[in-house]
Amino acid sequence: MSALIEVRDLGKRFGNVIALQGISTSVRSGEVTCVLGDNGAGKSTLIKILAGSHPHGEGTLLIDDQERRLSSPREALDAGIATVYQDLAVVPLMPVWRNFFLGSEVTRGRGPLRRLDVARMKETTRTELAAMGIDLRDVDQPIGTLSGGERQCVAIARAVHFGARVLILDEPTAALGVKQSGVVLKYIAKARDRGLGVVFITHNPHHAHPVGDRFVLLRRGRSLGDFAKKDLPMDELVSMMAGGAELESLAHELERTMGTDSSVVSELRADLQ
Ligand SMILES: Nc1ncnc2c1ncn2[C@@H]1O[C@H](COP(=O)(O)OP(=O)(O)O)[C@@H](O)[C@H]1O
Ligand SMILES: [Mg+2]
């Protein structure tokens, strides 16, 4: 089956900073593409390109086999690409159902008689959450009373309801404990099983491997490869990630003690490239 999104040799610069270079991967219906890398690796830059927040520089972006250059988040949404950012942009004191429909409220009646269709919005929220396997007793409770994992799940269910075909999740497990992370991973699998293409950004190989079908590893803006799961066992993924983190902190430590212009540091930096 053809890809929902495909990128070939994608690159992005900010002035002189090369934030991304030579990135190739794909996102398919019913699959999870994981984007892994340490801080500064270029993960957010990559998803901002897919989400329409940054136009790409070099390379090719294909959506449904059509070459595209997205110039606004609206264009990405119209193509069915929804992004759930880490901060989630919810209003904590508002009920779950209000947050679910925020900015897309359902109304009934016309003209001066137009009213919010509260009953319908509550019912839709309940059924959409149930379809994702989330059983909330009360959609009237403030969303701030839900756990971090549950809030992520409401955001996922919302994106699905409003017609997403591709769901981009920027580090949804980064601020969560083990149990809550498990909850989010379960809903990622659920969205995948409903036929969405999911882009899951994380720096944790233990979160990525169980749900991922495809893995793109970024280091300092470059790709270490685009792997199918069968070609990248868990232990290899872990050691590729750990290698990067270790060298990175070693380089950092050496810079601190020896100064940035030391030859040892520049050789190590060159190895890291
Ligand atoms: N708007 C921007 N202007 C200049 N440089 C940026 C901008 N956004 C990101 N960068 C740079 O691009 C690189 C990758 O950043 P980012 O994509 O945020 O990494 P990650 O999400 O993996 O931590 C970093 O060196 C960062 O400083
Ligand atoms: Mg980031």
Image (spheres, helix red, strand yellow):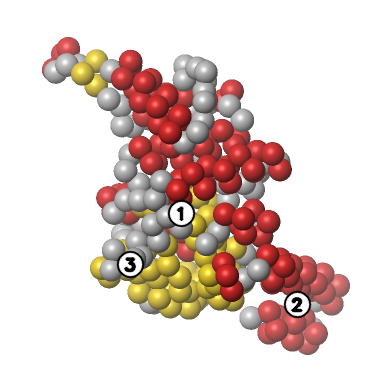
| Label 3, label 2: how far apart the Cα atoms are | 47 Å
Q: Would you say the residues marked 3 and 2 are in contact, meaning their CB atoms lie under 8 Å apart?
A: no
- Type of residue at label 1? Val
Which residue is labeled 2 in the image?
Answer: 260
Q: Viewer-nearest of labels 2 and 1?
A: 1
Query: Which circle's residue, 3 or 1, is located before the other in the chain?
Result: 3
Residue 63 image offset from top left, x and y in percent: 31, 64
Quarter of image, res 29? bottom left
Query: Which circle's residue, 3 or 2, is located before the other in the chain?
Result: 3
Nearer to us in this view, 184 or 108:
184
Residue under the point 59% across and 23% down:
145
Label 2 CA crowd tier, 10 Å (few <14, some 14–19, many 20+)? some
Label 3 CA crowd tier, 10 Å (few <14, some 14–19, many 20+)? few
Residue 101 image offset from top left, x and y in percent: 36, 29
Report whether 10 appears left or right of 236: left
Which residue is labeled 1 in the image?
Answer: 198
Quarter of image, res 57? bottom left
Which residue is labeled 3 in the image?
Answer: 2
- Type of residue at label 2? Thr
